[in-house]
Amino acid sequence: MLANHVRKFKLPVLFLAAALIGACSSKVSTQVHKSYPPIGYDQKIEVIEIYQAMPSGAEILGEVKIGDSGFSTNCGYAIALEAAKSEARKIGGNAIKIYQHKMPDALGSTCHRIKAHILYIPIEQN
């Protein structure tokens, strides 16, 4: 009889733990217009900052938004960039073009929030 109570207790605790762990990460939202086969995590993703021009010949595959989940921790700029790069890799992008970057502030969020286009830039072959 005690074993049944222990089993009933473990399941809700596991769900709660998973929810709390997930709540600590940034919110990631991706909108895909076109995709290619995913690329490996060992391949470089070029980051094109707001002040830099879009490369000629770049194809926009989609858009990624990295935001604050409300309980986010460890959400610095480098972490936001890595999350955006990860989303780009999933849809075959080899670059991201940041078009919006919101800095942490005391009233709104303690996280860096970015919006970026996921790009595929053709590699010139000689």
Image (cartoon, helix red, strand yellow):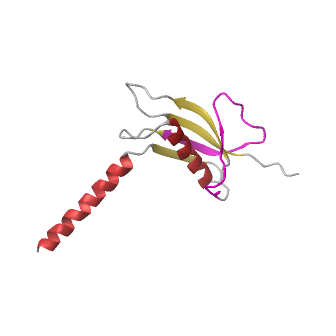
Q: Is residue 95 left or right of residue 3?
A: right
97 sits left or right of 76 in the view: right
Q: Is residue 123 covered in magenta?
A: no
Q: Residue furthest right?
A: 126
Looking at the rendering, which quadrant does residue 25 occupy?
top left
- Pinpoint residue 56: horizontal percent, then vertical percent: 78, 38
Please give the name of the residue rendered at 63% of the width and 55% of the height, measured from the top-left corner. Answer: 42
72 vs 14: above or below: above
Residue 67 percent location from the top left of the image: 46, 38
What is the quadrant of the N terminus in the image? bottom left
Q: Is residue 39 magenta?
A: yes
110 in relation to 85, above or below: above
How many numbered marks have been drawn onto this rendered protein structure?
Answer: 0
Q: Residue 18, position in %: x, y?
A: 34, 55
Is most of the magenta stretch helix, strand or loop? loop
Residue 92, quarter of the rendered image: bottom right
Q: Residue at x 53, y 35 (%)?
A: 114
Residue 10 in the image: state x and y as whole percent: 23, 64
Residue sitting at 66 percent across and 53 percent down? 43
Q: Which residues are magenta?
A: 38-66
Locate residue 95 relative to residue 23 in the image: left or right: right
